Image (cartoon, coloured by chain):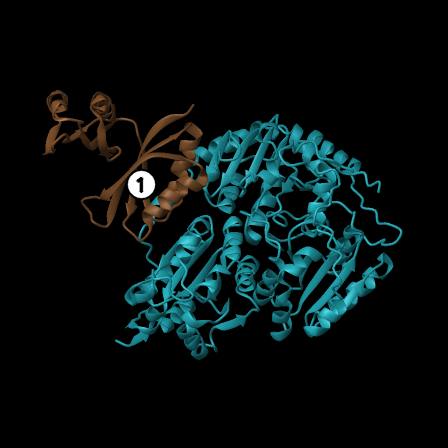
Amino acid sequence: MEKLTGADIICECLIEQGVDVVFGYPGGAVLNIYDSLYNYSDRIHHVLTAHEQGASHAADGYARATGKTGVVIATSGPGATNLVTGIATAYMDSVPMVAITGNVACALLGLDSFQEVDITGITTPITKHNFIVKDVNKLADTIREAFYIANDGRKGPVLVDVPKDITAQKAEFVNKPIKPHNPAAHCTLHQDSCLEKAAELIRESKRPFLYSGGGVYGEEGKAALARLAELIDSPVASSLMGQGSFDQHDPRYMGMLGMHGTKTAAEALKNCDLFIGVGTRFSDRVIGNPKTFAPNAKVLHIDIDPAEINKNIKVFHQVIGDSTDIMIKLAKIIPQQSHPDWMNNIAEWKKTYICEQKGTVQLDLTPQYLMETLDRLTDSEAVICTEVGQAQMWAAQYYSYKHPHQLITSGGLGTMGYGLGASIGAKCGQPDKTVVNIAGDGSFHMNLNELVTLSKHNIPVIELVINNNVLGMVRQWQRLFYDKRFSQTTLDRPTDYAKLGEAFGIKTFIIDKKADCEDILKQALEAAKTAPVLIEARIDKDINVLPMVPAGKSVTEPILEIEIDD
Amino acid sequence: MTQQNVLSVLVVNSIGVLGRVAGLFSRRGYNIKSLNVAETENPEISRMTIVAEGDESAVEQVVKQLLKLYDVSEVKILRDAVCREHIIVQAGNSSASRQPIIEIANLFRAKVVNVGESSLMLELTGEPEKINSFIGLLRPYRIKKLVRTGISALERD
């Protein structure tokens, strides 16, 4: 039988797993892998980023946009540690990713060799599992296992560390399916009796609240959720990660729930008698004070991860398993419900609690107007990536998502600098979609080096920087809770966005008043059909994200106004 | 209510598995009182006996989180089990203390495994309470060194 080098085995395994694009950055310990990628370049497209962190976010964004596993390759030592933020981001948001790192040769391991780092040790708390491969004969099965683990049950990142000599040694290679060595432990699935009890709770409920998270996947998941909402006759809210799992144009939709959720969702939460959480982990950013969460309701929790049950809040009943599967099964055993009074309440609240942003005399452009215009011009169909902070929340609040994971954002880890890399991956995975990264000027400056990746590979992403010259979210907290002591959050950086864009070879647009917004956005969208564009949208530094629930306070009582008197 | 729980955990003998399990306890804030690990009859599988402190919901969480580790194949909270601990202790401050120490050893059916000029080395296996009272009785004769294994336990069928 023909023998292949470890590096070739890695490439063969990637192809076997259906991988056609990888993100990465070469270096000493992965020289053999890159030498092999040179041969496989017709089947595996490698996207070279400016920094390994960008590559890790790109693999993550690719995975979220396609539902496939994202793959990132980096060298040992600093290459590997530069992946850490990207891996942790993927871990917190349950994104399937396989990170392949090189390491020093086996004989040099543990000797503090040049560019050596214990990356499996470092990433143990932020991966579902990781491996170091010290026998080339085990390399192929290890990579297969990595892909299996990344996608099994609740998804997440897996790291495979391969010492340099292993990539040079040869072993026999045959294509074969994945055989996990320890599959039994992770299959705690629901019983039919659990479904019966869930159906009973739903039948008894007069004021149900259906709530969806990032665990609702794909058009099938969306259809199952829509069917369930109709059958239960329930209003629906989604978490940040669940944006788009329910069509936001549907009158049942109440908006986001949580720290920056809508007042309607908060009122419904206060008054509901059954809270049904689907594919969600009840993050502290959603539940606020767990003691006052859904005070009059029983909580029914549907999720694939048993460890999420009773972790952050005590639930009344749970059904463990694939969310789509469970929703379809439930829909078969629940007769049509009708709650006209409850649905009327919701409709009334939606009319009453409208949060309208106002601009200032100097800068009349508001993020709300900007996002709503973008929403209209892209027919709510663009893939929206975000950085983290105010701009992220505005992107979540004011764009009307239609598809699960259409909003690609770092919800759990809250990684500033995530979005630009993620948008590279998203565009590679969804080349026919308009991809926009919504950034604040703070996050933008963290990883703007990846602009060069956009222009070099001509990846037509729209990088939309909402520039308020401050770290707006932190400033907002300082205004509310730190007596307006704006410590280190007033950026006022001299960055000239037009020149910056030009330097990277990217066409740049500047929006500084509301009247120009639509026109310039149209031009930018047109230009972005063939090339990346950069937009700087200037807004006032004191526009806040509202509604807002202070950390640890009751989600049912959001702040609707913040006084700006200076 | 905080209580002691004895967990029996079967793991695949892979690189770093002890670190993964121990790391999970520390980063989730669960206290390990003792941890005991060695191969089973199958050299590819090890059994860990972990004594952990925590209330009911903390223990529920720790079991679920352990089950999420890829190398963990079984986790049981032991209720009806044989629990044993092994101790080796060196005690004694003069030749005069030798006789009373031997008496204590006999009382507990501990074995004298080494005799020095002024001290004795003893070994004993038993339930943790028995080990504790053994240590308590030896204390007046000056314990020079001591090692205990922590509980290892097997569930009764």
Q: Nearer the viewer, residue A276 or A2?
A: A2
Chain A color in figure: cyan
The extreme right residue here reads A361
Classify mark 1: helix, strand or loop.
strand
Q: Where does label 1 land, which residue?
A: B74
Image-based side of A424 in relation to A14, left or right: right
Residue pictured at 50% horizontal, 68% vertical: A24
Q: Nearer the viewer, residue A403 or A39?
A: A39
Q: What crowding class fits label 1: few (fewer than 14 Cα within 10 Å), some (14-19), or many (20 or more)?
A: some
Q: Quadrant of residue A506?
A: bottom right
Image-based side of B40 in relation to A440, left or right: left
Q: Is residue A250 above or below residue A202?
A: below
Asked whether residue A322 is in view, the answer is yes
Asked whether residue A507 is in view, the answer is no
Label tally: 1
The image position of residue A292, as x and y in percent, is 61, 28
Q: Nearer the viewer, residue A469 or A59?
A: A469
Q: Is residue A16 above or below residue A234?
A: below
Chain B color in figure: brown
Q: Amino acid at mark 1?
A: Glu
Residue pictured at 52% horizontal, 33% vertical: A199
Residue pictured at 61% horizontal, 68% vertical: A431
The image position of residue A265, as x and y in percent, is 68, 37
Name the quadrant of the N terminus of chain B.
Answer: top left
Q: Nearer the viewer, residue A525 or B48?
A: B48
The image position of residue A562, as x and y in percent, is 78, 38
Image-based side of A561 in relation to B4, left or right: right
> Mark 1 — on which chain does it sit?
B
The image position of residue A72, as x and y in percent, is 48, 64
Name the quadrant of the C terminus of chain B.
Answer: top left
